[in-house]
Every structure is written in structure tokens, then in C-alpha cells.
Amino acid sequence: MLLFIAMVASVAAAGLLALSMDVHWEQVRTDPQCSPRMVRLLRTLGAVCLFASLVLCLAADHVSMASLVWFMTLAGAALVVTFTLSWRPRWLRPLVMWIPATTAPGQSGRPSQPDAIDQNG
């Protein structure tokens, strides 16, 4: 059970680290970009999940086997997130659904209306 939770933590870490990049953020969310503060938060949470997966692996096995299993979970998590981003990126949305939607500076979230037509046509 500890190794399964470690794998889930590794996938969450890889997903959070990937979503801290603008390209992947735009694939998953409709927001134009993630704020720099939110990028730092996503990277910090990703690092915490990586550390948690290491601790869980160490709790399940002795150090030499745990380190090997941890590296294998990292490789597996990277593959899972990579294939998810290339096939169904919106499946990673639960990782960032707690972040409120924002609009880009200067956008009101509404479609723009055409300017008034001048008198000359």
C-alpha cells in the first residue's frame, strides 16, 4: 500500500511540475498564464510530493531497494504525465482545480465588442 501511495505522489509531483510551465498550463486550463506566485507554489508542491514519495518508499523497504523503487516510480510518473499531456491533457485538471480562474491583464473575460462605426462608413 505504501508503494502505491508513493506512485500516486510521484505522478502528482510530475503533474504539478509540468503544470508550472506555461505551455502545459494552457493545455489544461483556459487561463492564459499562471501567475509567478502560483508557479512557485506549484513547484513547491511538486517538490513536497517528490519528497513524500521518497519517504514512503523508504518506509516500505530498506534504503538500497527503496532508492531503486523511487527512481522507477519517478520514471513511470514521467511517462504517465507525458502521455497524458500528449493525449488527454485535461485529465490533469484535478491537480489544479483548486486554483481560481484568472484572466490576463487587460481582459475582462467577456468577448470584445466592435468599435462604433464612424460616420464615413
Image (tube, helix red, strand yellow):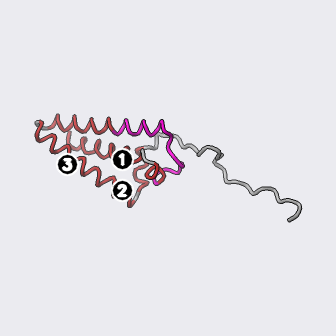
| Residue position for label 2 | 84
Disc marking residue 72: 3
Judge depth for marks 3 and 2 and give the one in front: 3
**Of callouts 3 and 1, the N-terminal one:** 1
Outermost residue toward the right in this view:
119
Q: Secondary structure at mark 2?
A: helix
| Side (left or right) of 62 relative to 39 | left
**Of callouts 3 and 2, the N-terminal one:** 3
In 3D space, how far apart are the residues under numbered discs 3 and 1 (Cα atoms)? 16 Å
Query: Quarter-wise, where is residue 85 in the image?
Result: bottom left
| Side (left or right) of 6 relative to 68 | right
Q: Residue at x 12, y 38 (%)?
A: 61
Where is residue 77 drawn, in percent x and y?
Answer: 28, 49
Disc marking residue 15: 1
Q: Residue at x 25, y 45 (%)?
A: 7
> For the C terminus, which image quadrant?
bottom right
Question: Which portion, as a residue range, is magenta?
Answer: 27-46
In 3D space, how far apart are the residues under numbered discs 2 and 1 (Cα atoms)? 9 Å
- Badge 3 amino acid: Met
| Callout 2 touching callout 1 (CB < 8 Å) | yes
Q: Is residue 114 above or below residue 15?
A: below
Q: Secondary structure at mark 3?
A: helix
